[in-house]
Amino acid sequence: MSPSGAAAARSDNPAENTQPVLLDCCGGLNNVDYSKMDLTVVEELLRYFNLWDSSVCVAVIAIIFNPFFWNVVARWEHRTRGLSRIFGSPHLACYCLGLVIILLNVYRSHSITVAMKTQARWEVMERTDVLYSGVAFLVLGTVLVVSSFLALGFTGTFLGDYFGILMDKKVTGFPFNITENPMYWGSTANYLGLALIGASPAGLVLTVIVAVAYKVAIRFEGPFTEQIYRERSQRRKHE
């Protein structure tokens, strides 16, 4: 059959020869009438949590800045011993950095509390079981933080390893037999408890940001601290 005949045959059976046509949904996104979209859910969410509120922005900055600050300063100290020279002693330098970290954490807690108070409460969370859960998390977090501090001491808690103040052996007792970073996760549990007690969606979001910031910090701190102790072991072998 010639090409023209084949074409004629195809034209005689339009039902068999019709090819599916890809349709441009809604004629393209530019033709969507956004004014008719139902944004009730989004509006309800924004009523409970305004990400662009100044108090929320300050809290987020404080959450991210704190671990960034102490990691950068501690690594600089480990590399140059700059703080030890300035203060004349690695112990005194560690105490001063620890005091600064404490003050930064106090400000972070304050900024989170302010952000929670300026944002709307969520009626769904205003229940007795949620309140008790918040108290439980607060107690758990406090136990983890306090017991971790008692097990490590001041220099062990506040990056004394980076100042050359190394512990004789790894702490494996409570609460380190539960989690490797009880100070961080205890602090996170405290913020979660406060968010539940305050029925604050903003507090829940900020708690998630705290957990992520700590997770990133652990990724940097863990291997670096292990390297510091490996270097000490190698020096002792050569001695």
Image (spheres, rainbow, N blue to C red):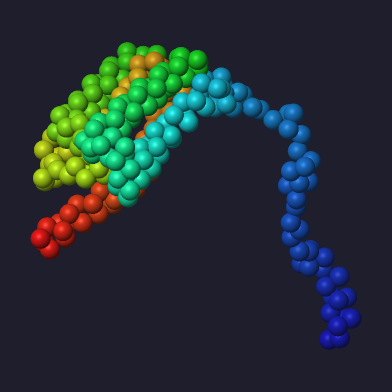
Q: Position of residue 173 (x, y in %)?
A: 11, 38
Instruction: Identify the residue at image location x=35%, y=16%.
Output: 197
Q: Is residue 185 visible?
A: no
Instruction: Identify the residue at image location x=28%, y=34%.
Output: 87
Q: Is residue 53 visible?
A: yes
Total marks drawn? Answer: 0
Q: Quadrant location of residue 112?
A: top left
State which quarter of the image contains the N terminus: bottom right
Q: From the viewer's side, name the closer residue of 136 and 40.
A: 136
Q: From the viewer's side, name the closer residue of 152 and 185.
A: 152
Q: Position of residue 154 (x, y in %)?
A: 20, 31
Q: Quadrant location of residue 183?
A: top left
Q: Position of residue 232 (x, y in %)?
A: 17, 54
Q: From the viewer's side, name the closer residue of 62 and 205.
A: 62
Q: Position of residue 221 (x, y in %)?
A: 31, 46
State which quarter of the image contains the C terminus: bottom left
Instruction: Identify the residue at image location x=50%, y=17%.
Output: 119
Q: Is residue 42 left or right of residue 13?
A: left
Q: From the viewer's side, name the closer residue of 124 and 55.
A: 55
User: Looking at the image, is 161 positioned above or below residue 110?
Assistant: below
Instruction: Identify the residue at image location x=42%, y=31%.
Output: 63
